[in-house]
Image (cartoon, coloured by chain):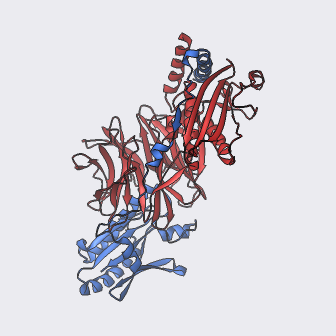
Amino acid sequence: MFKIILFFILFEFAFSLDATMKIVKNKSNLPTISVVSVNDSIKDRSIDTKLLKLIQKDLQVSGHFNDSSITIETEFTQIPKYKILRNNGIDLYLVLQVKKDTKNRYIINTKLYDVNTNNIVLNKSYATSAYERYPFLAHKIAIDVNKYLKAPSIGWMDKFVIFSRYLDSKTSEIVISDYTLTYQKVVVKGGLNIFPKWASSEQNAFYYTSYKGLVPTLMKQNLYTNKLEIILKSDGMIICSDVSDDGKKLVLTMAPNSQPDIYIYDTESRIKTRITKYSGIDVGGSFVENDTKIVFVSDRLKYPNIFAKKIGQNGVERMIYHGKNNSQATTSDDYIVYSSRETDNEFGSNVFNLYLISTKSDYVRRLTTNGRNQFPKFSSDGESLLFIKSTNKSYLGIIRINYNKSFLFPLKSGKLQSIDW
Amino acid sequence: MNSIFKNALLGMFTVGLLAGCASKDVEYDGNSLTSVDTKIDRVAVSDDKMTNSNMDSNSIDSRNRLQKITNESVNSVQSDVDGKVVLLESVHFGFDKYKLSDKMREVTTSNYTKIDETVQSYDGLKIKLEGNCDEWGSDEYNYALGLKRAKATKDALVADGINAKRIVMVSYGESNPICTQRNAACWKMNRRVDYRLLP
């Protein structure tokens, strides 16, 4: 038991180091897992193939496993041939069985074997009544397998991502999905509806900007009751850029005096407080340092850059000394990730890359290398980053910061406007 | 750093194996059933059913048509005010800019003349200024940039003599392109403010 605790402490220590430091992962140190599906009772084999691939993708995204390309068939009820698995370098063996029960639900039975100890270590069943929900089954299975390993949590995998996608001119819709965009459900449609933002970590409700009226309107919609509230209206624009951890305060960009500035809106007292008063553009604020400070984008230097301001104080602090167009930022504790264009030439390559900095040091770490990478959003645990990559198509990207890994998931139609998770 | 990480990962692996050895730690709950349905079943879908009386942008848009004069890269918006057609030229901006050039200031003055004539006949007339951007930059910044362009156009109209209370502004950021090709000429056309007259 002492060894377990010691190793666990070492692991946690490694992941608590400055995330701006470059980490080179040694794949040979990771356990190798083989995932197989054994099905004999369902006619539609597409679900188990898709499920299998998605679980493998989840385990790959976690950064905690090597995926074995070797498939060794077995019967679900039989003990696997440990020796053959060991000889093929497999440490963990996950077997899936997809069935339909009398209520026509899909039942996924799973068994996880620790090949090196000849033990079954997880035996669990998962269910859904609808085929299209299989991504969440896959994510739950991956989370449980990861939990067995006692690796850092990947619980974020089965949370909803909410995004807006442009469909046409002045037309967009708001969609909830899983992080791979495999599952999708439209929750707001008709007209221009943009910048969805979860109202709390429970993901029961979200804010968004509606253009249904003469002036942009900030709405709050309950995901489950469909209750719709008008929060605020503003001439020109209104966007909910961030929500405090307790869900009681919103950081807004709005322009009641025709001037885009950062405001904090108290959802209980319904009082809004103007935070910035610059005559140019101040936009895209987010809370930092226990909601005492706002990081935001401003064109104070005649180009967009990232600044910070203590709430209630006058001074503004420049945060980024790099790039020609830093027009987006996301924060997690003492870390800031921003999107930066290397040149201000309209006709240049104009790539946008993501950079990570710590407010406690001067080190800058580049997270992407090419293309247009924008709209970074930290996960709640600060270990992962969601972003939008644009080429001829839109992609939802995820960066596992401590693992130097990134993955892209294509949007089949439309163009991603904004994301939150 | 790397050696610590390697040790840690090795530790992670070993933890997994050691945990596997300890049978009392093994999770074995084959009888339980984890369902993903509960949270998804409850999700409702909104079709943007707001019924507020001033929420009439769709009907406004149906009365306004965008006209493109392609060989001059100039576009105008045609407004129909009780049967009278008013064509107002859009105002264009430089890359990442929201100040009016001298040439565009002439356009705002020309538009002012047409609007002022219409205002004489329709006292309740409102002018909607729609700020737009090209596809570069972050979306949120572009909505602010579009607003600043609309504000610059509003300031010009007010300076020329239009009552500020008649003017409403909306920024559409990059959501309302009139040209969708990916080239400089196209982006230039999208960096604009459109005028719409609302009787």
Residue B73 spot, x, y in % from top left:
51, 77
Q: Quadrant of residue A243?
A: top left
* Place of residue A321 in the rendered image (x, y in percent of width and height, measured from the top left): 45, 43
Figure disc tally: 0
Above or below for B44 versus A335: below
Give the vertical position of A114 relative to B65 (above or below).
above
Q: Which chain is blue?
A: B
Q: Position of residue A39 (x, y in %)?
A: 70, 39
Q: Quadrant of the N terminus of chain B?
A: top right
Q: Is residue A177 visible?
A: yes
Chain letter, red? A
Residue sitting at the far front: A102
Q: Nearer the viewer, residue A251 or A61?
A: A61
| Residue B174 at least partly seen | no
Residue at the extreme top: A2
Q: Quadrant of the C terminus of chain B?
A: bottom left
Query: Is residue A416 shown left or right of residue A44?
Result: left
Q: Quadrant of residue A289?
A: top left
Where B148 sits versus A138, above or below? below
The residue that appears at 71% across and 40% down in the rendered structure is A40
Which residue is painted at 61% across and 18% down in the image?
Answer: B20
Looking at the picture, does residue A144 appear above or below residue A47?
A: above
Q: Position of residue A58 (x, y in %)?
A: 60, 38
Pick whichever, B119 or B83, lies toward us: B83
Identify which residue is drawn at 62% across, 32% down: A110
Q: Residue furthest bottom?
A: B83
